[in-house]
Image (spheres, rainbow, N blue to C red):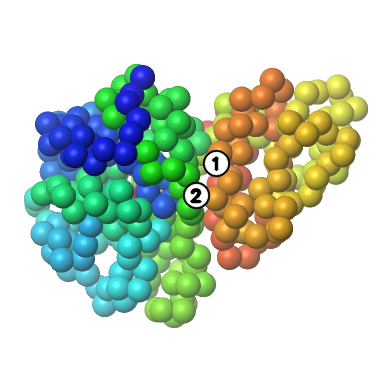
């Protein structure tokens, strides 16, 4: 398994010789490698078992470094960068040649983000190259929000995981770009759209799927547990599957279900706080996926604020195996 620790110099040394390292961010853990080294980038795709048409996000430590990688930052995106970086925001920007085509899957834009986590900020500041880092999960599975999640799934394939504790946001970054002169959101995420709109006015949200050429990697199958995941009204689901004699676990927003044993149910936020629910979501899905049951029953969150991004992940997890793209 990988070594887990808080040694930034060690993480740096591995990255400098072309190895991959698990890194904490405020959203989810990343599987990081030197973004300017095509061999390291190729390793990322192979360790994750990720198709090469699904581009990666380039992570850097401050705005002054970004000019090396992108031709320009359109005005509205500059405003978002100034307001929300470091933070759970990724911008799609026209790339310079220095960024290998493998990082962007041949697209002429590169996804860039300045993450907000003290260890990773320090690591990025100490490196003289940016890090390409997808979420550190095997392609299609639930994103990791703790170092142990990374170790459980990729530990045999990487030497080191920088342990930054539990991710504070718990959902991947919100991805934003320009379509003509329209600010466009391509992936709902940890930065709530209403915050983006408070800075740049109304934005358009483009539903992401593999048929959307702007976001080729945003497949339906992302975020799936290995067990069937069913979303509807929980009272109905619980009585239906109980009467069928099925074994199941329950993932709810805030309600407790006395008829279900305690270790087979998780409330994402008993207080009804969507930020807390987001932070707990992926770990809860993993925990229930590991229980000895045949399916997971869940419900949608209120469709407001971060609830929209959580619902997006829940709906993707619920896409039946045979319909996955
Ligand atoms: O919060 C996050 O964004 C995390 C942490 C580690 O930073 N990273 C993450 O990376 O979620 P990943 O690879 O799991 O998701 C990146 C998404 C993919 O769906 C990919 O298709 C999209 O970003 N993407 C990357 N570059 C793109 C580009 N040039 N145009 C459109 N979509 C792009
Ligand atoms: Mg991912």
Residue 301: name its quadrant. Answer: bottom right
Note whether residue 140 is visible.
no
Q: Between marks 1 and 2, how big is the CA–CA gap?
A: 7 Å
Q: Nearer the viewer, residue 55 or 22?
A: 22
Specify few, some or many for label 1: CA neighbours under 10 Å numbering under 14, 14-19, or 20 or more. many
Are the two marked residues, 1 and 2, in contact with CB atoms closer than 8 angstroms?
Answer: yes
- How far across and down, in percent of the image, does residue 234 sit? 80, 43
The residue lying at 35 percent from left, 53 percent from top is 117
Residue 89 image point, x, y percent:
37, 60
Number of the label disc, if any, that sits on residue 251:
none
- Asked if residue 176 is positioned above or below residue 56 in the image, the reply reads below
Image quadrant in which the N terminus is located: top left
Q: Is residue 170 left or right of residue 258?
A: left
Q: Which residue is mark 1?
A: 282
The structure residue drawn at horizontal position 23% and vertical position 47%, both measured from the top left corner, is 123
Q: Is residue 286 left or right of residue 184?
A: right
Left/right of residue 218 with respect to residue 60 in the rendered view: right
- Find numbered disc 1 in the image and state the secondary structure of the residue it sits on: helix
Q: Does dot 2 land on a helix, a strand or a loop?
A: loop
Residue at the location (21% across, 62% down)?
62
Q: Which residue bears the numbered disc 2? A: 170
Residue 87 in the image: state x and y as whole percent: 37, 61
Q: Mark 2 or mark 1, which is nearer the start of the sequence?
A: 2
Vertical position of residue 192 compared to residue 209: above or below:
below
């Amino acid at each position: 398994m990988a070594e887990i620790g808080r040694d930034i110099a060690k993480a740096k040394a591995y990255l400098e010789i072309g190895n991959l390292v698990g890194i904490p961010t405020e959203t989810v853990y990343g599987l990081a490698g030197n973004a300017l080294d095509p061999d390291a980038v190729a390793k990322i795709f192979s360790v994750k078992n990720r198709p090469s048409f699904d581009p990666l996000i380039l992570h850097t430590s401050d705005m002054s470094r970004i000019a090396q990688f992108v031709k320009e930052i359109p005005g509205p995106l500059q405003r978002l960068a100034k307001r929300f970086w470091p933070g759970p925001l990724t911008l799609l920007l026209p790339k310079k040649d220095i960024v290998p085509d493998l990082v962007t899957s041949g697209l002429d834009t590169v996804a860039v983000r300045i993450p907000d986590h003290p260890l990773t900020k320090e690591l990025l500041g100490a490196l003289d190259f940016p890090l390409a880092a997808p979420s550190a999960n095997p392609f299609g599975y639930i994103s990791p929000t703790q170092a142990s999640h990374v170790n459980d799934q990729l530990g045999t394939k990487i030497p080191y995981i920088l342990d930054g504790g539990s991710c504070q946001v718990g959902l991947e970054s919100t991805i934003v770009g320009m379509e003509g002169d329209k600010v466009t959101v391509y992936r709902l995420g940890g930065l709530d759209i209403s915050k983006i709109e408070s800075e740049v006015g109304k934005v358009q949200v483009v539903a992401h799927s593999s048929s959307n050429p702007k976001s080729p990697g945003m497949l339906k199958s992302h975020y799936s547990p290995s067990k069937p995941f069913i979303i509807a009204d929980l009272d109905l689901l619980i009585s239906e599957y109980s009467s069928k004699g099925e074994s199941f676990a329950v993932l709810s927003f805030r309600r407790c279900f006395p008829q279900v044993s305690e270790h087979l149910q998780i409330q994402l936020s008993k207080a009804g706080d969507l930020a807390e629910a987001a932070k707990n979501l992926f770990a809860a899905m993993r925990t229930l996926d590991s229980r000895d049951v045949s399916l997971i029953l869940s419900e949608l969150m209120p469709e407001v604020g971060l609830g929209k991004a959580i619902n997006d992940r829940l709906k993707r997890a619920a896409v039946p195996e045979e319909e996955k793209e």
